[in-house]
Image (cartoon, helix red, strand yellow):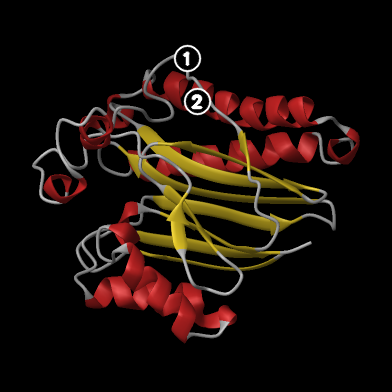
Amino acid sequence: MNFVARSDVGKRRTNNEDSFFAKEYNEDVSLFVVADGLGGYASGEVASGIITETMSACIEEYINILPAKKEEQIKEIFKESVVRANEKIYNLEKTDAKYEGMGTTVVAILKVKNNIYYTSVGDTRIYYIDEKLKNIIQITEDDTYVNELIRTNVITKEEAENHPQKHMLTKAVGILKDIDVEIKKLDKKKGYLLLCTDGLTNMLNDKEILKVIQDNNFEYIAEKLVLKANEKGGNDNITVVLVKKGE
């Protein structure tokens, strides 16, 4: 799987609390993770670092047997990687006041043979872009208070854009002792997958993201998305991983 990745501190922050992991281990297994840390001074980057390190270490434990596993077994291993990270972050948060309120969002993609599995916690997103670059679709659902209001028809998507509690999360990794993790399987065979933090999506809407992807060669897209987000204000850390998938 071809991929490009870029992470940037943005224009308003002094440290980058985003983390990412992107690796094609072999022709059968690849892992892509993007996380946006939450918490006080420096603790956000600790949390996002823990989840990328823990998830990759867990997948690497099973790397040689994953291709032979059945779908439900693969999903359980993928889920285990998030649960392990949740436990580590939750326990560390209790050890020192500097870690108070520490947690992280995460999106991740695990490719095993020709199958793609994905998961999401928080408001970091995965988008699917079709092979001909005509459409962009968010395939994850934001775990936010405002998205819950949209889902229950309390407010519209348009009203959500300027809602004062737009960024209030309803779920994050490491905040609670136990976490409910849902693993889904992607049914698209070809196209692109974009993993990105809200530092991108708060600056660029879906159409603007798609335009950057349409207008640039694959190897420059991650860099150009970060550049465009910074041009629009760069209010937060910006992390993007773009994966090209095929048969």
Among the 4 quarters of the image, the one containing residue 156: top left
Where is residue 161 shown, x and y percent of the image?
Answer: 16, 51
Answer above or below: position of 143 versus 88: below
Alpha carbons under labels 1 and 2: distance apart? 8 Å
Front residue (pair 108, 8): 108
Q: Which mark is residue 211?
A: none
Residue 21 against residue 246 in the figure, above or below = above
* Marks 1 & 2, CB-CB < 8 Å contact: yes
Which residue occupies the foreground of this view, 51 or 162? 162
Query: Residue 178's mark?
Result: 1
Q: Which residue is mark 2?
A: 86
> Residue 57 occupies which quadrant of the picture?
top right
Point out residue 105 in the picture as x, y percentages from the top left corner: 41, 39
| Left or right position of 161 against 48 | left
Amino acid type, residue under disc 1 in the picture: Asp
Query: What amino acid does circle 2 point to?
Result: Asn
Q: Position of residue 13 (x, y in %)?
A: 23, 59
Q: Position of residue 151 (x, y in %)?
A: 28, 32
| Number of numbered discs overlaid on the protein picture | 2
- Please state if 185 lies on the left or on the right of 211 as rendered: right
Left or right of 233? Residue 36 is right
Residue sitting at x 27%, y 36%: 147
Which quarter of the figure is the N terminus placed in? bottom right
Compared to residue 109, the image places residue 133 above or below, namely: below
